[in-house]
Image: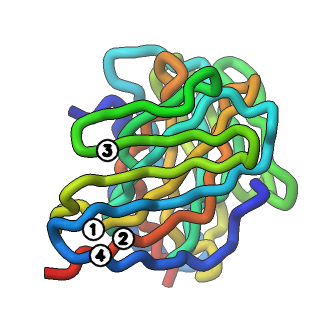
Amino acid sequence: GAVVSQHPSWVICKSGTSVKIECRSLDFQATTMFWYRQFPKQSLMLMATSNEGSKATYEQGVEKDKFLINHASLTLSTLTVTSAHPEDSSFYICSAPRRQVAFFGQGTRLTVV
Amino acid sequence: GENVGLHLPTLSVQEGDNSIINCAYSNSASDYFIWYKQESGKGPQFIIDIRSNMDKRQGQRVTVLLNKTVKHLSLQIAATQPGDSAVYFCAEKDYGQNFVFGPGTRLSVLP
């Protein structure tokens, strides 16, 4: 069964609105979670590392004000895409390490219209 | 990551044949490697892992080989089945908790 749950699995939103994606670790605590973005037919691109109780660490080129990350508890990290634009349309995936193995959520397909 | 943004190479194999998917990793300090399988529209799933102190590890129908000299990793799938069709990623981990993913290979199983 899934050890990391991501919600929603897909979302369509209008340009200018914000969208929140949740990532939950099931049956284990994760002080660190990772957020990835994946374009069609491409590999996973790390966007940021979410740290419980402290600020997220963003990869170079990722706008922290655009992609807000909150890791308020040991089992939940959220990614909010603010003022979404069509170019933000993508597949977003979270992961959480458990005993050194990174387990992934189901992914969220975001379409901005 | 170093290998992001590349388009996926494709491997086509006949059902029942063995598949070999290759991966070159970049960091000689990486000490742990994982192969993931990603089906369309889903997140990656763990297949098999290997530590840098090993050169081979076997699972059910899958074998991972590690050659640290040339920084090469391979995934062998025995008796490939239609359900094996997916994109396969290798991932390397160094001293931190983050994994760096390879560009991925699309495996297509022909009937």
The residue lying at 51 percent from left, 39 percent from top is B34
Q: Could you tell which of marks 4 and 1 lies nearer the N-terminus?
A: 4
- Does A92 sit left or right of B94 as displayed? left
Q: How far apart are marks 3 and 2 (CA)?
A: 14 Å
The residue that disc 1 covers is: B85
- Seen in the picture, residue B91 relative to A29 is either above or below; the reply is below
Q: Outermost residue toward the right?
A: A60
* For the residues bearing labels 4 and 2, Cβ distance under 8 angstroms: yes
* Marks 3 and 2 on same chain: yes
The residue lying at 33 percent from left, 68 percent from top is B40
- Does A35 sit left or right of B2 as displayed? left
Q: Distance between the residues labelled 4 and 1?
A: 10 Å
The residue that disc 4 covers is: B13
The amino acid type found where label 2 is placed reads Leu
Please state which of residues A40 and B58 is positioned toward the viewer in this rendering. Answer: B58
* Marks 4 and 2 on same chain: yes
Q: What is the chain identity of the residue bearing mark 1? A: B
Asked if residue A25 shows in the view, the reply is yes
Q: Could you tell which of marks 4 and 3 lies nearer the N-terminus?
A: 4
The amino acid type found where label 4 is placed reads Val
Q: What is the chain identity of the residue bearing mark 3? A: B
The amino acid type found where label 1 is placed reads Ser
